Amino acid sequence: MSRPDKIPGAACKGIGVDFGVGGGGPDTPPTYIAIGYILTDNLEKFQAAVAKHDAELRKDLPNYTTIQPIIQISEVKL
């Protein structure tokens, strides 16, 4: 397996992770246990870099979680 952190190469400008610690009310569980972020300044280049390894990444995913991932593409506005 290629190192997942190296797959997108220069198309990846940064990464981050949020870990859920609670929900909207007292003593409620978080909606998500973790949210990972991958920052890029060119979505097409990033998708092309990752697409080459799609099957490899999907095969490796069960080594890290049994939860079906949800993927969302967002634009950050500062």
Image (tube, rainbow, N blue to C red):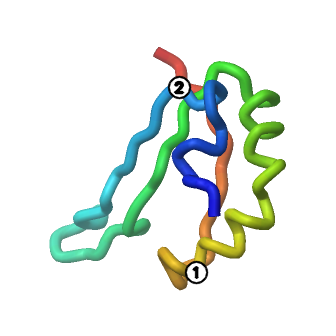
Residue at (57%, 53%) from the top-left corner? 4
For label 2, the SS is loop
Residue 54 spot, x, y in % from top left: 78, 58
Quarter of the image holding residue 16? top left
Tag 1 secondary structure: helix
Q: CA distance from mark 2 to mark 1?
A: 26 Å
- The one of 48 and 9 positioned closer to us in this rendering: 9
First of labels 2, 1 by sequence position: 2
Q: Which mark is residue 41?
A: none
Using a 10 Å C-alpha cutoff, classify the residue at mark 2 as few (fewer than 14 neighbours), some (14 to 19) or many (20 or more): few
**In the rendered structure, which amino acid carries the disc numbered 1?**
Pro
* Residue ranking furthest to the top: 78
Indicate the quadrant where residue 55 lies: bottom right
Between 32 and 17, the one nearer to me in the picture: 17
Considering only vertical position in the picture, is 43 above or below 41? Answer: below
Q: Which residue was labeled with disc 1?
A: 62
Q: Amino acid at mark 2?
A: Lys
Establish if 22 lies above or below 77: below
- Height in image: 47 above or below 44? below
Q: Position of residue 62 (x, y in %)?
A: 58, 80
Q: Residue furthest left?
A: 26
Residue drawn at (62%, 72%) of the image: 60
Please report contact status of discs 2 and 1: CB closer than 8 Å, yes or no.
no
Q: Is residue 17 left or right of residue 2?
A: left
- Whether 50 is drawn above or below 24: the answer is above
Density class for disc 1 (Cα within 10 Å; few <14, some 14-19, many ≥20) is few
State which quadrant residue 47 falls in.
Answer: top right
The answer to whether 26 appears left or right of 37 in the picture is: left
Taking the view exactly as shown, the residue that stands out farthest to the bottom is: 66
Residue receiving disc 2 = 13
Image quarter (top left, top right, bottom left or bottom right) of the N terminus? bottom right
